Amino acid sequence: MIRLQNIEKVYRTDTVETLALNSVSLDIAKGEFLSVMGPSGCGKSTLLNIMGLLDMPTKGEIRIGDNKTENLTDKQLAQFRNKTIGFIFQSYHLINDLKVIDNVELPLLYRSLSAKERKELAGKALEKVGLSNRVKHFPTQLSGGQKQRVAIARAIVGRPEIILADEPTGNLDSAMGNEIMDILLQLNQRDGTTIVMVTHDENMAKKTHRLVRLFDGSQVQ
């Protein structure tokens, strides 16, 4: 589902050159649940951004399914991301002025769907994460765990084949973190969604199929 070959990412300023990723090669199978671990600043989020086509590598090749991505225009990349990849972030990235259901609908605004179709899909996504009773609430009226459930619903509303999760349990206590992890495991096992999760939590990583470790931008496991 995802193939990275000899990925290198260098950030340059006028005076400093930082090697964020160094010759990372990785194959992730369809339906796999992969964890990525490593100390802060080792390149985990950079790797996830490259997998999600939010950032381009300095060197190397990315394939998502049968699609080579380096020749796609920005518009084509945006369309491909919208249909294929769902993103979950540690800090939720919800819009406080929008109701829960409107936050979940956001990725669907870029598709040719009626308002009724968007509402129906958003409602189904919220039902999957156990928040059908919160559709008219605003994010400020929710707990951290509920906000992350909304973020997951937003990530899955367009039925993506891939979910990329950056520390999805990082801001939560252990009980709520386990609930969020259970939802991700259900999405993987029930729907066959391919999931790549960056985490600092060994216990969460042990629940996934495979663990990759990064250190100073290089893959060490």
Image (cartoon, rainbow, N blue to C red):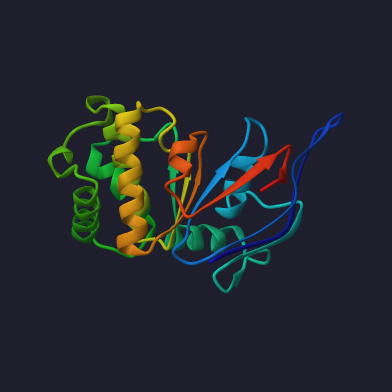
- Could you say which is closer to the camera, residue 27 or residue 46? 27
Tell me where residue 178 appears, x and y as whole percent: 33, 37
Query: Residue 139 appears in which quarter of the rendering?
Result: top left
State the residue lying farthest toward the right. 15
Residue at horizontal 48 percent and vertical 67 percent from the top: 30
Q: Is residue 167 visible?
A: no
Q: Is residue 80 above or below residue 86?
A: below
- Could you say which is closer to the camera, residue 149 or residue 78? 149
State the residue lying farthest toward the left. 133
Label count reads: 0
Q: Is residue 44 above or below residue 61?
A: above
Q: In the image, is 212 to the left or to the right of 103? A: right
Residue at horizontal 48 percent and vertical 34 percent from the top: 201
Q: In the image, is 25 to the left or to the right of 66? A: right
Residue at horizontal 24 percent and vertical 46 percent from the top: 129
Tell me where residue 48 appears, x and y as whole percent: 57, 47
Q: In the image, is 166 to the left or to the right of 3? A: left
Tell me where residue 75 appears, x and y as whole percent: 55, 60
- Could you say which is closer to the camera, residue 28 or residue 144? 28
Q: Is residue 20 visible?
A: yes
Q: Is residue 149 above or below residue 144?
A: below
Tell me where residue 153 appears, x and y as whole percent: 30, 48
Residue at horizontal 62 percent and vertical 47 percent from the top: 47
Q: Is residue 201 above or below residue 73?
A: above
Q: In the image, is 115 to the left or to the right of 59? A: left
